[in-house]
Image (cartoon, rainbow, N blue to C red):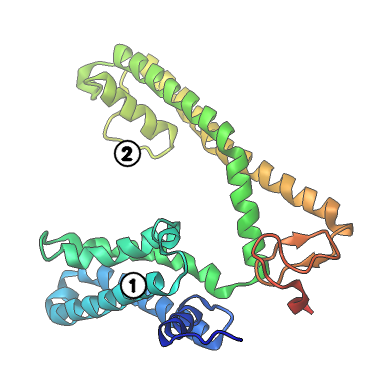
Amino acid sequence: MKKVKSKYNLLRQKTQIIIYGTNTKAGRLFDLILLGLILLSVFVVMMETVQGFDAKYHSEIVLTEWIITVFFTLEYLLRIFSINKPIKYIFSFYGIIDLIATLPMYLSLFFPGTRILSVIRALRLLRLFKILNHPKFTSQSIHMKEALTASRGKITVFIYFVLISTIIIGSIMYIVESKESGFTSIPMSIYWTIVTLTTVGYGDISPQTPLGQFLAALVMILGYGIIAVPTGIVTAEFAKRNTNQDIKADTIKTTCAACGTLTQNENAKYCYHCGNNLNNNQ
């Protein structure tokens, strides 16, 4: 005998379809409203820092921020209510961002000025790729994630080398230059080294001696190489994965319409990555 669902379970199911169902009309409408409120929230927070605008519309700004905060709070609670494993969502990347997005306005009741932190809600715009739910976007994001993961070791070693280099160069500049030039300590000299290596060049500290200027020129040239290396490492890994994908293209039988994962088993009924029914692709 078929088990009849209780009203509580039916409510959870309907709520889950609306909040998580990006393939349903109600779900997509909810996501678009959510996206619009996120954009509005970020815009309002930015305009609040404009003195003339804030002086004229301060009450309206605060009211709008509270309305959006209440909506985000209800959305966060409904996500926990409707999902089967609330803990998994709460400690997930999106779950943490959703929680942080609701806190600034409540904190402002106890710590004035923290309302500006609401701009962190811009991180919620990352949900745009989930809303679009296009296999091409999902597939590319997976490839990018894999490339960054594969490059993690090389980039860590590279950053370690850069940190050691900045300490050595900063110490040398402290010895070469005088305190009158701004190199008052080794930490200050390391600060100058980092600013110069990254080609930022604030100009608040600059070497005055010929030897110091010569070393500065070497650091500037070295800076261009340092900027290019991490980019090259990630790009190489990304290109390698695209090449491997092209090599396997002849054996690929199915592409999942939900997440973009490529499945080589022509007899597969479900996507091994997201569990989507591959027969729905047709």
| Rendered location of residue 132, percent (x, y) | 57, 74
Give the answer, above or below, for where 130 lies relative to 111.
below
| Rendered location of residue 157, percent (x, y) | 53, 27
Give the answer, above or below, for where 21 lies relative to 260.
below
Give neighbour class at mark 1: few <14, some 14-19, many 20+ (Cα, 10 Å). Answer: few
Which amino acid type is shown beneath numbered disc 2?
A: Tyr
Q: Quadrant for the N terminus, please.
A: bottom right
Q: Which of the two labelled residues, at mark 2 and mark 1, occupies the earlier sequence position? A: 1
Tell me if 150 is positioned left or right of 70 in this view.
right
Q: Residue at x 20, y 78 (%)?
A: 61
Extreme residue in the right direction: 250
Q: Residue at x 89, y 58 (%)?
A: 250
Give the number of the mark in front: 2 or 1.
Answer: 1
Circle 1: element type = helix
Q: Is residue 270 in view from this perspective? A: yes
Circle 2: element type = loop
Q: Residue at x 26, y 34 (%)?
A: 204
* Residue named by callout 2: 202
Q: In the depicted view, which residue is nearer to us: 189 or 115?
A: 115
| Rendered location of residue 232, percent (x, y) | 62, 40
* Residue named by callout 1: 77
Q: Residue at x 38, y 73 (%)?
A: 81
